[in-house]
């Protein structure tokens, strides 16, 4: 790729009298709209939607798609995001009319097919996580976190335990963890990581107490390291009366190897749009099912989907439920993809997924250590974090390394996260990448390190081959332009 | 290779293990405490080949009764609308659907520009200057409107009309419970908000007044009057709105709403058993820096080229953590794209034409019900209205399936006073013949 002119906005392509639709005829007797609606409810200035022919519409979006990078375009080692292959059969299944045009508010007999998928997916996820009950309702990981925290809150309150106002979160945790704690009405307490990148047990003992509602852990954590002291952590938190919450966005490393339920976690969320191949869609939709142990089950969101004999039913009889967190039954379209994936892989396949994901990550890590600083020298799981501190001393920040990777036709890793590693580069290759792809990426990373030493400006001025150069984010935030304004309107305002 | 998605061969594995410096893959998992290692086989169904799995899933799907097999008069928040073929064609481009959130703007201009266009379209329809890149769905967007209003005004009490979607009300209650915000429900007067009661309930401590427009019963609420009540004590006015209706109705922004939320399922998104759909969130300029979710802003590159980036991120969880204005991270970007495409295909003229077709056909159906002797509730409606029946609606719906119809929503499931009342939705897709036959069948089953 090379620099390209900015694409016109669809509004700038608009020509009066063009259109790209074909509506069924209005074959009923019609009335003057003014006789059907009170004048004050009739819109006087029309909404300025674009006017464009069908082919020009297609070309507009095709042009935009050509300025976008997806997994199908190339390697996308974005840490914590599990950018694995999105199977095409999944897309086909999601588009089967019987699913795609199923309305959620029908009588049970009309939705048996949809309920069967929901129920069977719940059963599979119970087994994979080792939890007692699953609710699929939450729309994404963050909503799953919040849902489970609301249940933990209800649990403590039902026990008359009203002083459990705090949620413990490691300093390496994803931002949604503390944010979800706030939205659920808790205060956040941070527990430090030790020199090995794991939860500092002494610090945990210091912050835990009779005000602890829960600890939120990702395991493997966001450094890609397995919290090997998990059983000790479990005992410390449980003895203090708190619950263990598992951020399952990182499940890809441990399927069929260890289950959150067996590690002692009381609640978990999964990101079906990561481990279970729901496509990210440029930012969503996701799906964030939660799993809980039996003692939390009575607080699950309503309704539950259960099986009685051969029939699937909705169960609203949950007097202590935290209520509803999402309309209808959640992001069903993503369940279809996750379900299809699980059925495509089977038990052996899922085990191999985790093994290969871990193999690929360790392979890249070992080949890059030394050239880039590896802050925690132990086997990683599905991802690992390097520090660009060495390159920073030579004049190139991690941002520059990331931008230079674009020139080599790789999507950069996650950068500047987790927060407890300086100049972090968080790399997650996933299991669907071949060794040749990994080798090419490794070569690019090694080359860039050399360029930093030998031709610094080349790196600092990167990217060179993308359609657009580095963008001015300060300007965007200082004087926000968040929508298109037509020239004539801008003129009027002056 | 053991599976088509897993390219690592035995030879690769050997070489890689060697490079890592271990002799067996199990060493990479040795830090998992032995006592909790999972040593058995997962008890899930064995892997199935592509063809057989597709067949099986098609068979499961065929157990559903859908708007493809039957003609549907069911809406209640999820509607059977025209979806231009271009929508699926474009969202099937994998450059869009296999991308992550556009963190690297140089290789994400397509998505970023598409979101910027979505923000503009929502702003146009709602009559408010700022719209975000999407929320999970209408009800959670509405709930975030409630909590944001309470947070902004520092008044931990909101008043919400009973005429909103009952599931919206449930979701709003759950979100508010988390933040100790009191939820007061203003009662109905027929199929509309009781404005006298609403006026009485709104006081100095009220952070927001929340209504739906058109409301759950399809009735058009008097936003002019409600705005006055909402702002009387300096609370915010939050309106949840069907964006299709807004191509024809005066937008809430023009009535002085501070926050407008809703779901764009009506534009290009199939029912999909209730999700994924797409929430939207629009607000005044004043509230911009407190908005939940991602915002795309326009800027320039180092050579002055126009480009787009994620902006005002200091509101968001990955920067502000526990002080963020919301915990939302992943949103509904692909569905927002679908809606943008549908809105653009319809365009200025088509969106109005489609909205008008809904009003006309729903009005025709309403008159047909009246002519057949049914009692119909509500006065001014968009594409839904309430019909009183003599029997349980769920039972009648069971019979309607056998005649090829999906009947309307059983209001008795959500409102005690509306047992034996059906909420009928008539979109532009229903033909006169379908409407006539539906009214006739309902007449028969109703006795
Ligand atoms: C570790 C971790 N936790 C939570 C989340 C939040 O998930 P979502 O974006 O689906 O809300 C993510 C992903 O962004 C994550 O990587």
Image (cartoon, grey):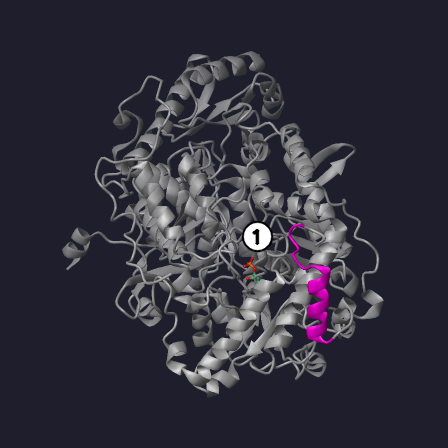
Q: Is residue B248 left or right of residue B177?
A: left
Residue at the extreme bottom of the image, as rendered: A393
The answer to which quarter of the image holds residue A472 is bottom left
Note whether ligand 1 is within 8 Å of mark 1.
no
Q: Is A272 rendered above or below residue B426?
A: below
Is residue B27 at all visible to an observer of this figure? Answer: yes
Residue B321 horizontal/vertical position (percent) = 52, 70
Callout 1 secondary element: helix
The answer to which quarter of the image holds residue A373 is bottom right
Quarter of the displayed picture in which ligand 1 can be seen: bottom right
Q: Is residue B407 left or right of residue A124?
A: left
Region of the chain picked out in magenta, as a range? B4-21
Taken as a whole, is the magenta stretch helix, strand or loop? Answer: helix
- Mark 1 neighbour class, 10 Å CA radius: few under 14, some 14 to 19, many 20 or more: many
Which residue is located at x 57 percent, y 41 percent?
A328
Between B94 and A46, the one nearer to me in the picture: B94
Residue A84 horizontal/vertical position (percent) = 59, 57
Between A311 and A82, the one nearer to me in the picture: A82
Q: Is residue B410 left or right of residue A401?
A: right
Q: Which residue is mark 1?
A: B174
Residue at the extreme front of the image, as rendered: B11
Residue B28 horizontal/vertical position (percent) = 74, 70
Q: Mark 1 falls within which chain?
A: B
Residue A1 horizontal/vertical position (percent) = 38, 61
Which residue is located at x 59 percent, y 77 percent?
A368
Q: Is A46 rendered above or below residue B105?
A: above
Q: Is B56 rendered above or below residue B373?
A: below
Q: Would you say residue A235 sits in the magenta stretch?
A: no
Is residue B153 at all visible to an observer of this figure? Answer: no
Q: Is residue A394 left or right of residue B409?
A: left
């Amino acid at each position: 790729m090379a620099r390209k002119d900015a694409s016109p906005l669809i509004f700038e392509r608009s020509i009066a009298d063009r259109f790209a639709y074909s509506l069924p005829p209005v074959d009923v007797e019609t009335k003057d709209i003014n006789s059907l609606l009170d004048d004050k409810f009739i819109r006087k200035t029309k909404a300025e939607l674009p006017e464009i022919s069908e082919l020009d519409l297609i070309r507009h979006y095709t042009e935009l798609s050509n300025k976008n990078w997806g997994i199908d375009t190339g390697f996308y080692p974005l840490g914590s995001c599990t950018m694995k292959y999105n199977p095409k059969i999944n897309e086909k299944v999601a588009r089967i009319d019987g699913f795609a045009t199923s309305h959620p508010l029908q009588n049970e007999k009309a939705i048996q097919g949809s309920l069967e998928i929901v129920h069977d997916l719940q059963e599979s996820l119970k087994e994979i996580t080792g939890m007692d009950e699953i609710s699929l309702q939450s729309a994404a990981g963050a909503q799953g976190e919040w849902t489970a925290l609301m249940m933990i809150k209800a649990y403590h309150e039902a026990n008359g335990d009203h002083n459990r106002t705090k949620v413990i979160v490691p300093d390496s945790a994803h931002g949604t963890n503390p944010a979800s704690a706030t939205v659920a009405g808790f205060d956040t307490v941070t527990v430090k990581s030790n020199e090995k990148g794991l939860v500092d047990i002494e610090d945990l003992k210091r912050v835990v107490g009779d005000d602890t509602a829960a600890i939120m852990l990702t395991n493997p954590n966001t450094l890609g390291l397995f919290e090997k002291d998990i059983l000790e952590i479990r005992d410390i938190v449980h003895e203090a009366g708190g619950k263990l919450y598992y951020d399952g966005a990182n499940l890809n490393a441990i399927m069929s190897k260890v289950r959150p339920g067996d590690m002692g976690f009381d609640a978990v969320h999964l990101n079906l749009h990561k481990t279970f191949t729901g496509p990210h869609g440029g930012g969503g939709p996701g799906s964030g099912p939660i799993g809980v142990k039996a003692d939390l089950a009575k607080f699950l969101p309503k309704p539950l989907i259960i099986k009685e004999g051969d029939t699937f039913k909705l169960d609203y009889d949950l007097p202590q439920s935290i209520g509803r967190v999402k309309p209808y039954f959640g992001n069903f379209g993503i369940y279809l993809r996750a379900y299809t994936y699980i059925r495509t892989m089977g038990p052996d396949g899922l085990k191999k997924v985790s093994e290969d994901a871990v193999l690929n990550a360790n392979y890249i890590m070992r080949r890059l250590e030394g050239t880039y600083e590896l802050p925690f020298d132990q086997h990683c799981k599905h991802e690992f974090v390097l520090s660009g501190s060495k390159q920073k001393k030579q004049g190139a920040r991690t941002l520059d390394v990331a931008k230079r990777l674009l020139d080599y036709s790789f999507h950069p890793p996650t950068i500047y996260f987790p927060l407890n590693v300086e100049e972090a580069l968080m790399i997650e290759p996933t299991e669907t990448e071949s060794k040749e792809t990994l080798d090419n990426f490794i070569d690019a990373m090694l080359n860039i390190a050399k360029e930093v030493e030998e031709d610094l400006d080349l790196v600092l001025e990167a990217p060179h081959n993308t359609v657009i150069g580095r963008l001015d984010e300060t300007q965007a935030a200082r004087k926000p332009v968040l929508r298109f304004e037509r020239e004539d309107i801008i003129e009027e305002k002056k | 290779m053991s599976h088509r998605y897993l390219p690592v061969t035995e030879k690769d594995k050997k070489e890689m293990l060697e490079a890592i410096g271990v002799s067996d893959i199990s060493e990479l998992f040795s830090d998992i405490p032995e006592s909790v290692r999972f040593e058995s086989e997962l008890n899930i169904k064995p892997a199935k080949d592509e063809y057989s799995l597709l067949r099986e899933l098609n068979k499961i799907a065929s157990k559903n009764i859908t708007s493809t097999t039957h003609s549907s008069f069911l809406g209640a928040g999820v509607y059977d609308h025209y979806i231009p073929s271009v929508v699926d064609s474009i969202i099937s481009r994998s450059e869009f659907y296999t991308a992550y959130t556009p963190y690297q703007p140089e290789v994400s201009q397509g998505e970023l520009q598409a979101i910027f266009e979505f923000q503009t379209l929502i702003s146009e329809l709602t009559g408010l200057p700022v719209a975000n890149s999407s929320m999970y769905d209408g009800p959670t967007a509405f709930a975030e409107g409630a909590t944001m209003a309470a947070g902004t005004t520092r008044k931990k009490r909101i008043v919400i009309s009973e005429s909103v979607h009952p599931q919206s009300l449930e979701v709003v209650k759950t979100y508010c419970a988390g933040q100790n915000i009191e939820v007061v429900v203003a009662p109905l007067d027929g199929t509309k908000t009781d404005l006298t009661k609403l006026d009485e309930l709104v006081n100095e401590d009220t952070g927001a007044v929340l209504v739906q427009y058109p409301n759950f019963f399809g009735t058009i609420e008097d936003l002019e009057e409600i705005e006055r009540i909402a702002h009387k004590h300096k609370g915010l006015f939050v309106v949840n709105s069907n964006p299709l209706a807004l191509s024809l109705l005066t937008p809430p922004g023009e009535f002085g709403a501070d926050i407008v939320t809703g779901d764009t399922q009506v534009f290009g998104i199939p029912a999909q058993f209730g999700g994924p759909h797409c929430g939207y969130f629009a607000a005044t300029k004043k509230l911009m820096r407190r908005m939940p979710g991602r915002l795309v802003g326009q800027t320039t590159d180092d050579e002055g080229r126009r480009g787009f980036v994620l902006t005002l991120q200091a509101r968001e969880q990955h920067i502000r953590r526990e002080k963020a204005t919301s915990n939302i991270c992943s949103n509904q970007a692909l569905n927002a794209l679908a809606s943008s495409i549908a809105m653009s295909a319809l365009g200025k003229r088509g969106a109005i034409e489609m909205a008008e077709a809904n009003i006309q056909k729903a009005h025709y159906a309403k008159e047909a019900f009246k002519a057949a002797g049914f009692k119909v509730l509500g006065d001014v409606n968009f594409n839904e209205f309430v019909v009183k029946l003599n029997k349980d609606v769920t039972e009648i719906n069971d019979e309607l399936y056998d005649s090829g119809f999906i009947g309307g929503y059983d209001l008795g499931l959500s409102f005690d006073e509306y047992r034996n009342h059906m909420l009928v939705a008539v979109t532009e897709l229903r033909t006169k013949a379908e409407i006539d036959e539906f009214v006739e069948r309902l007449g028969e089953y109703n006795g």
